Amino acid sequence: MIKKLVLAVLALGVLGVSCSDDDNPIKTSRLTLNLDGLEELGSDYVYEGWIIVDGNPVSTGTFSSVTFPQTFNVDKDDLNRATTFVLSIEPTVDPDPAPAATKILAGDFSGNSANVSSNGIVGDFSSASGKYILATPTDTDDTNEESGVWFLDNSSGSAVAGLNLPTLTDGWKYEGWVVFDGTPVTTGTFTAADAADDNAATSIFKGDAGNGPAYPGEDYLQNAPAGLTFPTDLKGRTVVISVEPDPDNSAAPFTLKPLAHMVPSDAMNHTTIMMGDGPVKSLSGIVSR
């Protein structure tokens, strides 16, 4: 009797495995992401991975945690045929099944791994440089010139663009910031270094004498955020250029910050000041299949 029971259990086990294979004809393989430098996006956006198969994007799943490694189950045949991995930023509630324009990492597979980077898909900031001046051209008061920052170079006697930055891909914009005791306050978003930024005509901080020069920048003269006082003195503050998703996921600076500089304590008004490298010029990682 015991022998017959054992044989019956073994038969059920074999049958169970056989039925499982028949019911799951699609086989999956593991895709592992080990990415550096990403930050959490908040509740409105998520990251989504994509593999490019025969020229078409195939989603590998979404995630919000930026703790790695993370593993996803992906169709085995698709994964074997994939040539490229791409990471995008997507709305949490996303009616569009295609990847958004805001792509942050990409890299081609070589064997079973892909070295992914933001350099090609967002921009290469290895040669980025910047200059700025302290000035407040949007009011008629010449006693508060240290309360404004403009990303221009006037060292030749006439103003030219102060920022040397690559053209961004779709889905991204630059944004200037001044950090006041840990509180970043925007100077405005922009895509071109030789034109006024997006808030030139709508800034609540500028004075009442005009929009200022046709370059990115800001005067901090009125309507200061809570805890701050305008006009102020930018010496000792940190000036930053970040790269932001468009549409933006947060009112705070994004993780990509190619340029930054603490304004010297002896900085002279209306005089060109050189920026330095920012804390994050690129993002990278390894994707394994």
Image: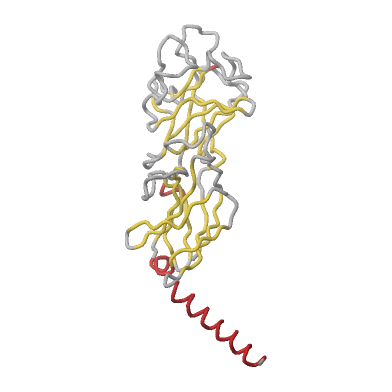
Is residue 84 placed above or below 141 in the rendered structure? below
Residue at the (38%, 49%) spot, across then down = 99
x and y percentages locating residue 64 in the rendered image: 54, 48
The colour scheme used to paint the residues is secondary structure
Spot occupied by residue 163 in the image (x, y as percentages of width and height) = 43, 32
Q: Quadrant of the N terminus?
A: bottom right
Q: Which picture quadrant has residue 102?
A: top left
Which residue is at a point 57% across and 49% down the rendered structure image?
Answer: 65
Residue sitting at x 48%, y 80% = 18
Number of numbered tags placed on the structure image:
0
Q: Is residue 211 left or right of residue 67?
A: left
Of residue 209 and residue 62, the one placed in the foreground of this image is 62
Residue 100 vs 185, above or below: the answer is: below
Which residue ends up furthest to the left in the rendered image? 55
Q: Residue furthest right?
A: 2
In this picture, is 8 found above or below 197? below
The image shows residue 253 at horizontal and vertical percentages of 53, 34
Q: Position of residue 162 (x, y in %)?
A: 43, 28
Name of the residue lying farthest toward the front: 1
Front residue of 159 and 22: 22
Q: Is residue 89 above or below residue 111?
A: above
Give the left or right position of residue 169, taking residue 278 as reference: left
